[in-house]
Amino acid sequence: MSRKYYITEVFCEGPYSGNQLATVVDSEGLTHAEMQQIARAFNFAETTFYLGGSESSGFDVRIFTPVTELPFAGHPTLGSAFLIRNHIVGFETPTLTLNLGVGPILVSFADDGVVWMQQNQPSFDVGPDRCPDKESTASMIGVDPSDLDANFHPQLVSTGLEFLIVPLKNLAALRKAKPIAGMIQTGILAFCEEGYRASHRFAARMFAPDLGVSEDAATGSANGCLAAYLVEHAYPGKPEIDAVVGQGFEIGRPSALHLRASKREQFIVEVGGQVNLVAQGDWLL
């Protein structure tokens, strides 16, 4: 039985940019092991499998890296929602819901082409038993402790998938980061308040070797954690953020991630980006 698949670029800035995503349609009947084999064959940061659904009940999607299944990830959410709306189901709607491992995630479609997702409420870990000190963090990503921002500290944050958020003092420090094999137990998002382009407020890099991703081109889940971190610590000087983050430049996949977040009684964390369809075909195995 052949199964149709699509390849999209998410958080793209033009052709051959953003984070690549493979999405397999007609996934009913595939076992967990078969999905994992297909994801390993594509060897993108993530591959998604569309299992059906409806506008009223939401659309069921599973997400795999080359080595494991994830309950949530950012660019797979946006890319899958874009395909469901425009190419799989094909209906005009300003919003739709994906049913993921973390529960329902609302996705909206702006008139300017940006696709947005609202992430779950963030959680923040504190204390030396969970958050490494600056010296240990610097060792993990191959920089000097003096390269870290002196005014803010590394912290584990999750909106469905946990990342260690690491504030660096400038773009030069970010560019020299290089993860040290065997030292990283969770995904790390290092960032600085300096962009690759004039339109970027921040720059970021994400490393997750234990998930089969040595460096990611654009990480919506991690940038949602970053947005929550910025608001929680009033990093930009106020408890809200509306900014663009550049990512993927060091690996030749320049990406732009739009962040909107605020905190009143609860957090509102949204991450958005452009999505392009670049290929489609039939999976024959």
Image: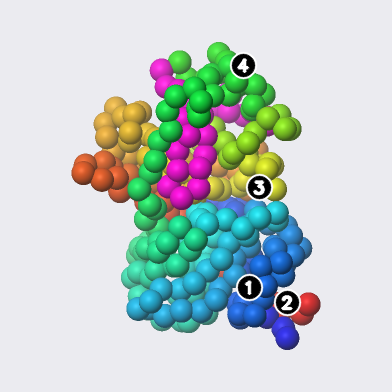
Mark 3 or 2, closer to the camera: 3
**Residue tagged 2:** 283
- Mark 4 or mark 2, which has the lower sequence index? 4
Where residue 211 is drawn, which disc sits there? 3
Looking at this rendering, what residue extends furthest in the bottom direction? Answer: 1
Which residue lies at the image location 45% right of the left edge and 38% below the top edge?
157
Q: Of helix, strand and loop, which one carries label 3?
A: helix
Give the percent coordinates (x, y) of residue 249: 61, 41
Whole-percent x, y for residue 183 in the image: 68, 30
- The residue identified by callout 1 is 24
**First in sequence: mark 3 or mark 2?**
3
Q: Earlier in the sequence, mark 4 or mark 3?
A: 4
Q: Quadrant of the C terminus?
A: bottom right
Asked whether the beta carbons under mark 3 and mark 1 sit within 8 Å of each other, the answer is no
Res 241 quadrant in image: top left
Q: CA distance from mark 3 to mark 1?
A: 20 Å
On the image, the x and y values in percent for residue 204 come to: 53, 36
Write down the residue under mark 4.
144
Q: Position of 251 compared to 102: left or right? A: right
Q: How far apart are labels 4 and 2 at the CA level?
A: 46 Å
Asked if residue 7 can be seen in this view, the reply is no
Residue 156 screen position, x and y as percent? 48, 34
